[in-house]
């Protein structure tokens, strides 16, 4: 498991970053909340990561803050919520706002997030 990556930011797009670590480029999927905190390419960057391994694919997800990674890990453990949906949550709402919506059972706010319908919003609240 890759816990974190620290190196030079080589490439930055809205949904991913490429970080060079001693000549090895890591393609890392990121939420918008992390994108907003990253420097321009060429700058030093440190990301907390979560690696998802499947039979036919390995994906690395990166986060600027530990609370984002923690929420991501909680979300992907909910039935019907995968990494792509968890990234959409982090890209749509700040962690504190999402947590407030869950605590206050605000299904309308949660179900407005791309990839989350009413049933998934209800599962997230439970």
Image (spheres, grey):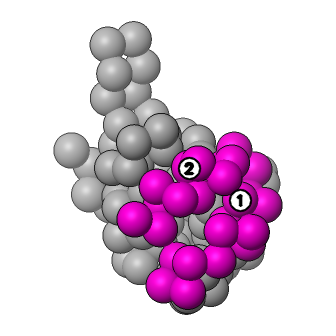
Q: Which residue is mark 2?
A: 120
Q: Residue at x 47, y 68 (%)?
A: 125
Can you tell which quarter of the image residue 96 is in? bottom right
Mark 2 and mark 1 lie on one chain; the one further toward the N terminus is 1
Nearer the observer, 77 or 118: 118
Q: Is residue 74 above or below residue 56?
A: below
Q: Is residue 31 above or below residue 34?
A: above
Q: Quadrant of the C terminus?
A: bottom left
Residue 121: x percent and y percent? Answer: 58, 58
Q: Residue at x 35, y 70 (%)?
A: 70
- The reply, left or right, for residue 9 in relation to residue 53 is right
Query: Residue 45 in magenta?
Result: no
Q: Residue at x 66, y 52 (%)?
A: 118
Residue 42 visible (yes or no): no
Packing grade of label 2 (10 A; few <14, some 14-19, many >=20) is some
In the displayed image of the protein, which residue is found farthest to the top? 56
Q: Which residue is mark 1?
A: 111
Residue 3: x percent and y percent? Answer: 26, 57
Magenta region, mostly helix, strand or loop? helix
The segment highlighted magenta reads 102-126
Q: Secondary structure at mark 2?
A: helix
């Amino acid at each position: 498991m890759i816990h974190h990556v620290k190196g030079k930011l080589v490439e930055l797009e809205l949904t991913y970053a490429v970080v060079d670590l001693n000549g090895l480029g890591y393609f890392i999927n990121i939420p918008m909340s992390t994108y907003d905190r990253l420097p321009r390419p060429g700058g030093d960057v440190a990301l907390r990561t979560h690696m998802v391994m499947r039979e036919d694919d390995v994906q690395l997800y990166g986060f600027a803050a530990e609370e984002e990674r923690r929420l991501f890990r909680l979300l992907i453990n909910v039935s019907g919520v995968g990494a792509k949906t968890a990234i959409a949550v982090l890209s749509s709402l700040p962690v504190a706002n999402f947590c407030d919506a869950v605590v206050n059972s605000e299904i309308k706010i949660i179900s407005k997030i791309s990839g989350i319908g009413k049933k998934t919003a209800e599962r997230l609240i439970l």
